[in-house]
Structures are given as C-alpha cells and as structure tokens.
Image: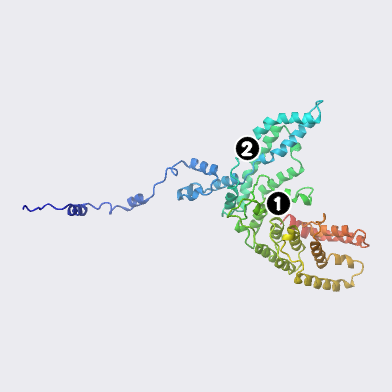
Amino acid sequence: MLRDDTPTSTSSSDDMKRRQPRSASWASGPEKRARKKSKLSRFEQLPTELLQSIFLESVNPSLPEVSLHLVKVLSSKHICLEFCFRAFYKPLGHFRDKWMWVGERVLNSRLESPLGEEEADEKVYEAFSEERERLLKASPVERWDEFRQPAVQTRLLASRFFTWPFFLDLTRRAHPVFQKEVLWVNGTLGLREDELLRKEKRWVHTAIENVVRGVDAKPPEYQFHNVEKWYTLPWFRVKKGVSLPGKTLVPPWPWDIEMLLRWLIRSGAGRALTAGPVDVMLMPIPSGRLHDAVKLRREPIVFFFAVQARVDVTTEILRSSLSLKPFSFNITQNLLFSAHEAGADSKLDLLDPFVWKWIEEEEKRENDEYHDQSWNLRAEQCLSPARWLRKELQWLQNREPADPYFSLRNSFDNFLVELTHRKQDSPEMSELTSLGKMRRAEVRGTVLDEFLYDA
C-alpha cells in the first residue's frame, strides 16, 4: 500500500487560521471606535426638521426614548414648548356654538323684514349654515383620542421641565394664537369686539395678559361669584382623568409650586377623577396632603385641596385646624364646606368629643374675658369662634340646604351678613351692623385680600 502523506482537512484548516495575519486585532483606537459605533436607522437619518414635525404631529411623548440621537434632536426648549402647546391648547371651536348663537341674535335684531320671529330665525340659521360648517372644519388643532390625551397630559405635567416659568412661557406662546382666533371669528361673523366680548370675557383677556406679564391683578368691579371665571384661562384644556403631578403635592409648597398648583386645579386637573376613563395613571389626592397643609397653616393649599379638588376631610384634620394658634376661620370654614358638599359620604365625625370639648372650653374662656363688657357683650359672643363652630356643626347635622349668604371666600364679611340675616328681628341687630363695619375695616386687608388675590 502506498503511504498517504496528504494532510487531513481539519489539520489544514487549523494551519490556515494560524497563518492568517491579525491586523484586525491590532487596529488603532479611532478605527475601533468607528467600528463599535452603532449605525443610525433609516428613521433617525431623516432631516432634523422632518423628525421634529413627526414628533409634534404625532403628540407621542415616548418617541424621544427610542434612542439617544432622538433625545438630542427632540429635547430643545422650543420643541418642548410647541409639544405642550399642542397637547394643552384648546381651540376656539369649543366656544363656537355660544358665539354663533350671539351672532344669530345680533343679526336677527338688525334684520329689517316683515317676517315673523320664527321665520326670521330660520332665515338667519340658513345664512349661517355654510359658515358654521367652514368654522368647524377650520380648527387649527385637530381633535385626537380623548382616551389617550389624559395620559399624555399627566406625563407632561409630571416632567421636570414643566415648572411655573415654563407655564408662563406656554401662556406667552398661546396668547397670540388665541387673539388671532378671536379676531378671525369677529371678522367672520361681522361683529364688533364690544358686541362679542362681554364684561366677563374682557376679564378673561385681562387675566391672560396679567399671566403673560407675571402679574396677578384684581379685576374691576370685583364680585365673589366671578372669581372662578377670573382665574380661568380659556385656552388651557385639562381633560378629565388627569392627575396632579407629585411635585405639587409635597410640602412645604414654595411660591412657584403654589402658583402652578393654583392654575392646574382651577383648570380641572385632579377633579372628577372617577368620571374619566379607567387608567393606571389616575391618582387621587391623599388626605395626608390636606393634613400637612392644615398643620403648616397654608390657607390657599387648603382651599385648593378641600374645596376645589374635593379631598376627603377626616376628623383628625378638623382637630388639627382647631389646634392652630391663633384660630383660622378660613381653614376651618373650608373644611366644613367640603364636608357639607360631601353629604352622606363625608368622613367627618360631627359628634367628636375633642371638638365639642374645645367648643365648651373656648366658650367658657370667652365668657370670662367678655364678662366686663357692657353693650356689645352679645355681639362679641356672636363673633366668637366657638359659637360660630357650634352653629355650623349643628347646621351640618341637620343637613339643611346651603344658605345663600354662606360663602367660604369672605369669612368675616359674609359671616356678619349671615348673622344679620338670621336675626333680623333681634334687638341687637343695630349693634351687629355697627360692629360689622368696624370688623370689615379691620380684616379686609388681612383676610380677604390675602386669601383671594395672594392665595
């Protein structure tokens, strides 16, 4: 047999591997970094302007989380401001039904024809039908999924960049757009500004300008029932189901967080959470935050949580309010008003021994202090916190309908009016009236103005 000296296939392959040059392993540093650097996808290779347009049109806050390249491209302040503008801006289309009704009535009054009232209304409605369709189709911001919008708004509010200065910048961005829409509707309907914008609407425009300038001015001819309209931005839309961010619920609430919390709650955030769609992000305000606000004596925060956000008021919270020195009418009145609005669902124990013991001790102390008084003894006793709290608790126990004079925004002022209203036939009515003028002069600068305008 001939001897086979040819190497096997395995040995030849091993020899070839050993003889291959290792130039790749000895590559320089820049070549290694170039080889290890990941290539951008086709979507990331699009122009920056196109990526920003896709991000703004999609209203998807999760898009920058795809890669670091998109984070750099889509994280500028201008893009964040424009994205929040599209997420929160409420176009004028929501007011078109009311404004079209105003335009119909104005033209109906100008219409000079022998037609009857019903025929004139039909004629005006036909004249406005085409214009109404054009208005509805020309919305600057398209309506998008209502079930997705609360989650997006909640996520934006919880972001670190959404602060009070950012909210002012957002107001400066939205104010010119809203003014253009107002002028456009005025020209479309053929109405003058004084005919279209009534007194309350002029107040709204003044409020927007004050927010832009950073000033919280007082409205002219101020009335208590117009406070909510004064502190409401018509373009700022917060959908039902949006929960307040956690940064606004943590004490001690500095001034910028307090201002942001004021506008969010008055715009609807945190209110009627159960009315919206079921979402994991829904989070009601805990009662512990209200308790912290009472302990810190923050009257505006107590007003926002107890009255506007409808946080459950417990007996422990009422005890803490009674332990404050000096006694705060505004805080206690807000808590009782919230318990009254809750009705049978209230968690407040109206027969708590601690509360009634406090009332008895205060009444005894006040009787000892005012024992030497002569003509205004009964009037001073009517103004005492203990007697006032006793009457309010008895009123809540009877579950009577709310008194029209009962208002939580003007504690001492309307409280005197309420006493006068209930005791019109009493002999001390003149004493209460004269004493009320002095009390109003004393507390107006410290209670009313501070609570309403600086709250």
Query: Which one is closest to the eye, mark 1 or mark 2?
Result: 2
> SS of the residue at dot 2?
loop
Find residue 18 and report its image quarter. bottom left
Name the residue rendered at 69%, 50% in the picture.
215
> Quick check: can you spot residue 92?
no
**Mark 2: amino acid:** Ser
Name the residue rendered at 39%, 49% in the picture.
38
Position of residue 204 measured from the top left corner of the image (x, y, whole percent):
72, 45
For label 1, the crowd category at 10 Å Cα-Cα, with few meaning under 14, some 14 to 19 and many 20 or more, is some
Q: How far apart are marks 1 and 2 (CA)?
A: 31 Å
Farthest residue to the left: give it: 1
Position of residue 244 measured from the top left corner of the image (x, y, whole percent):
62, 55
Identify the residue position indicated by label 2 in the image: 139
The colour scheme used here is rainbow
Find residue 104 and report its image quarter. top right
Position of residue 96 measured from the top left corner of the image (x, y, whole percent):
69, 38
In the displayed structure, does residue 338 sit left or right of residue 22?
Answer: right
Residue 60: mark: none
In the displayed structure, does residue 83 sit left or right of residue 430?
Answer: left
**Mark 1: amino acid:** Asp
Identify the residue position indicated by label 1 in the image: 216
Q: Please state which of residues 398 and 243 is positioned toward the viewer in this rendering.
A: 398
> Quick check: can you spot residue 412?
yes
Farthest residue to the front: give it: 1
For label 2, the crowd category at 10 Å Cα-Cα, with few meaning under 14, some 14 to 19 and many 20 or more, is some
Mark nearer the N terminus (1 vs 2)? 2
Compared with 255, 92 (above or below) is above
How many numbered discs, if any? 2
> SS of the residue at dot 1?
loop
Q: Are marks 1 and 2 in contact (CB under 8 Å)?
A: no
